[in-house]
Image (tube, rainbow, N blue to C red):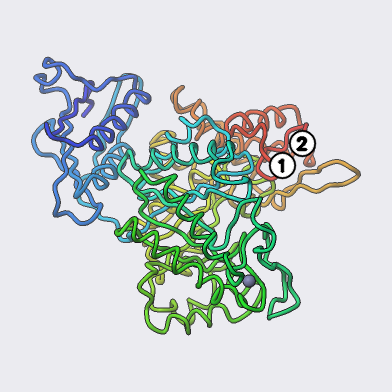
Amino acid sequence: MNMNTPFLDLNPDASPTVHTIASLFARHLKERTSLAVGESDAVHNDPSNLNLALRVTPGIGAEGFRIEDVSPGRICITGNDERGLLYGVGKFLRTSQYGPESFVPGSWRGTSVPSLPVRGIYFATHFHNFYHDAPIEQVERYVEDLALWGYNVVNVWFDMHHYSGIDDPEARAMIERLHAILHAANRVGIGAALVVLANEAYATSPIELRADWTAGHDGYTREPGGHYHVELCPSKTGAMELEMKWVEERLAAFGDLKLDALWIWPYDQGGCTCSQCAPWGVNGFLRLAEPIARRYRQVYPEGKVILSTWYFDHFTSGEWAGLEKAFTTRPDWVDYLLADDYGDCFPQYPLEHGAPGGLPMVNFPEISMYACDPWGGYGANPMPQHVQQLWNSSRHVLQGGFPYSEGNYEDINKAICAQLFWQPDRPVEDIVREYASFEYAPEVVEPVLRAVAILEHNLPHARTRLDGAIHLSMQHTEGAELAYDLLRQVDAALTPRARSAWRWRILYLRALIDSELSRGGFEVSPICEDAFEELTALYTAHHALDWIAPPTRSRR
Ligand SMILES: [Zn+2]
């Protein structure tokens, strides 16, 4: 069925969000086929045109959708709610086929309801990475793209320590940017969320109220990593009040948004190691977290409080066990515990003992920094097997999660996580197939899958300083030539639009760079240098810190 001029059928009382969702379909159609959604009576009356009805009708299951043929030439996407419609449009878009001036509607039919309720993404908006420096329209667009994959909440952190106060012009500029990102989420009907460190502070925090970060006392064997040294100690008189004032300011700054969740974070950064606060995770941290959570819930009665256990038992001991004691009865001010760790393992304690308080848990998968220095510096970093392995080890205790993202180069990993949250037993390979079919072309799925497997195996890349210069190296190079050959063949088969799209360029350039580096003894050839420059432009990484920037000549 090749339908040349699809037109959209919306209820007359469709909400602004439904109209926005319809516009996402129209935009993809236009970009991928040059076709515009038909609006004239002539288009509507021509039975050879596709009539795509978008409806919201409860009864399918929270955030679920149904796609069905209702009559010849008429397809209906029904969302249980606006989010369900959004995800149904995403599924329909991903399973359709596109060519110049041609559109073949996707053949997937049926009902799909997400298994897990928390399908979030955390954008790290720092280090002059993509989220920090890219034109805001690109980041807003990216939020919409991710929403179509099934995400239902976007989370950012206003990192206070950079600023002298909320009225610092730089603080205001950052709030405006973060607000735009979260508003883009709300506009398509998904949630926004904020992170706070329980004891975070501005650069100008009162010195007499500041936290202790030293180790070697009160059970602390290591200094809490990343501590900014401006955080407050809640055991000092006046510190709690000041923290609550700052919470109030932040809630007001984002007060017009639909904040579905608030994360409260213990360490990295944050923490206080003093005698009155230690061990932080079950002492000072909880004393601050509870009033912060309660205040947030007063403003957002439906909002979810997500209490982070990040780096519990890294600097001291007994925090996980202590939380189990503190939450002998389930606390009424926490909705989810966030648990995860950097690297190859999910934290052992909740796997062995269950979650303290019997609380549901969400994860924080690291999809950005793993095994590669600089992060994303060589292009896309697809790691389906790694994500699958971590997921398999912990999914039985999880109600969803929030991947940690440093940029757009891990786009494939984001699609994988979104779909694992949607359907936990879906094979990752199946998700990569859907991604490759949509973003590249249905005909190239198999060679892309083969190349992605090689690129994942060859992911470890290092930068080493030697004799005053930076040297690049790869731990594995097997198959680098084959991956590049496969993707060169794919490149020739793509439409001009798909071939020039950033999602293709970052994958193609990764294979090119790996091939160049491995053939040339890890010397950077001119073609490799050009690839680093192109990646820099695609990430808007011109001012990025070295660990998140492609290693161009000026950085070696
Ligand atoms: Zn303290």
Q: Nearer the viewer, residue 362 or 298?
A: 298
Q: CA distance from mark 1 to mark 2?
A: 7 Å
Front residue of 126 and 8: 126
Dot 1 falls on a residue whose secondary structure is helix
Image point 41% across, 53% down: which residue? 120
Quarter of the rendering occupied by the C terminus: top right
Question: Which label is found at residue 546?
Answer: 1
The answer to whether one can see residue 335 in this image is yes
Residue 296 at x, y percent in the picture: 39, 59
Does residue 268 appear in this view?
A: no
Residue 271 place in picture, x, y as percent: 62, 66
Residue drawn at (48%, 37%) of the image: 176
Q: Nearer the viewer, residue 511 or 272?
A: 272
Give x and y (percent) for residue 230: 66, 57
Residue behind mark 2: 555
Give coordinates of residue 248: x percent, y percent: 45, 54
The residue at the point 21 percent across, 29 percent down is: 1
Amino acid at the residue labelled 2: Arg
Q: Total label count?
A: 2
